[in-house]
Image (spheres, rainbow, N blue to C red):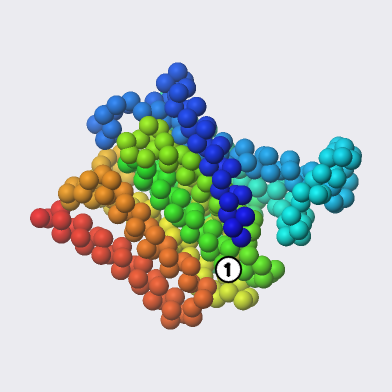
Amino acid sequence: MIWLILGATLPSMLVCWAAAWLVRRGGPRFRMVDRPGVRKIHREPVPNGGGLAIWLGIVLPFAVGQLVLWMLLAAQGDAAAAQAAVPAAAKHSCAACLPEFVRPHLPGLMQQSGKLWILLAGGTVLMLLGLIDDRRGLDWRIRIAVQTLVAVVLVRLGWRLSLFLDMPVLTGTLSVLWIVGLVNSLNMLDNMDGLSAGVAAIAAAMLAAVMLLVPDPVTNQPQLFVGGFLLVLVGSLLGFLWHNRPPARLFMGDAGSYLVGYLLAMATLTATFAGENVPPHAILAPLCVLAVPLYDTATVVYIRLRSGRSPFEGDRSHFSHRLVELGMSKTQAVLTIYLATATCGLGALLLHQVNTAGACVILLLVGCTLVLVGILETAGRRK
């Protein structure tokens, strides 16, 4: 398992770190810069093309992995078309370096690779949408329309919530809302140095742990495909965080937040959280892991609507801003949100092991954590 973790996280981390360094240098030349403004908390122009680096940190390792997979399958004789393209010496060397524990999973990985590239294609569309938004600014209606279109296409291709309901229209609609909602939740959360990327890394790591701990109901084996995918995302986010830690020298921009929110949503739709040997309440694991971003989005929308403003109108009413207003430093606010995310996410690691009563206790703990945060915020503002 340690080799899976290192093999998935390290390459993506190094690729993203190097790509982010290049984006920092070339961003101003291509007008990929976030300048200070009324709603901005930074005082100097900062390159905002970090989303491109995160995308490259995910796509490049998967592209190399796809090529290696073809070579390994050719060496085993499982892909006749690939055999014809690979020299005999290369086949022999591939077979010799192939770890024994990896071999049984190669056909399954090849079978899943088509879905992987469809999923990444959707993420690429949203990343490009974010790049355009970062450079020129787009009306919120255009952004939501493109996000919804991508979500609808992916849901029609098979990614959807099951919820143990034989109601395709309802589950399809909820799936589209889940994808678009998480895309915008991570976008709204991106308002302080290291915040959105850090929370996403914690959430992805928690979900990856669930995938490696909870057996697939069909195969009764760890869900290596989704777990590995999430670990690649974790690695890319860690590489980006080196440049985004306070004081940030690079922002992920809308390109990064759209991409990361989309990938988290799609990973949860791809995974199997409950089944024959796993209790139904285990499907609530993503809600535990992503409770804090969803809390931030819900409270921000409520505050804006209560003030008679559009929920898409940017301001400084986010969870992190409210913590700073209570007297915290920006770093303390970010670390507090990290801790709240980890606290809520830990419940997801236990949902598959407990009965219904235990699940209710876990969900109550998550709910109490968020309510406690809300009470402290309200009391602090009144004071």
Q: Is residue 202 visible?
A: yes
Relative side of 96 to 37, left or right:
right
Q: Quadrant of residue 292?
A: bottom left
Looking at this view, is 308 or 229 the one in front? 229
Looking at this view, is 168 or 264 the one in front? 264
> Which residue is outermost to the top?
29
Relative side of 3 to 203, left or right:
right
Query: In the rendered image, which quarter contains the C terminus?
Result: bottom left
Q: Secondary structure at mark 1?
A: loop
Bin the neighbour count of mark 1 within 10 Å (Cα to Cα): few under 14, some 14-19, many 20 and up: many
Q: Is residue 147 visible?
A: no
Residue 337: horizontal and vertical position, in percent?
32, 53
Residue flagged by tag 1: what amino acid is it?
Answer: Val
Residue 362: horizontal and vertical position, in percent?
40, 72
Relative side of 141 to 168, left or right:
left
Residue identifier under label 1: 214
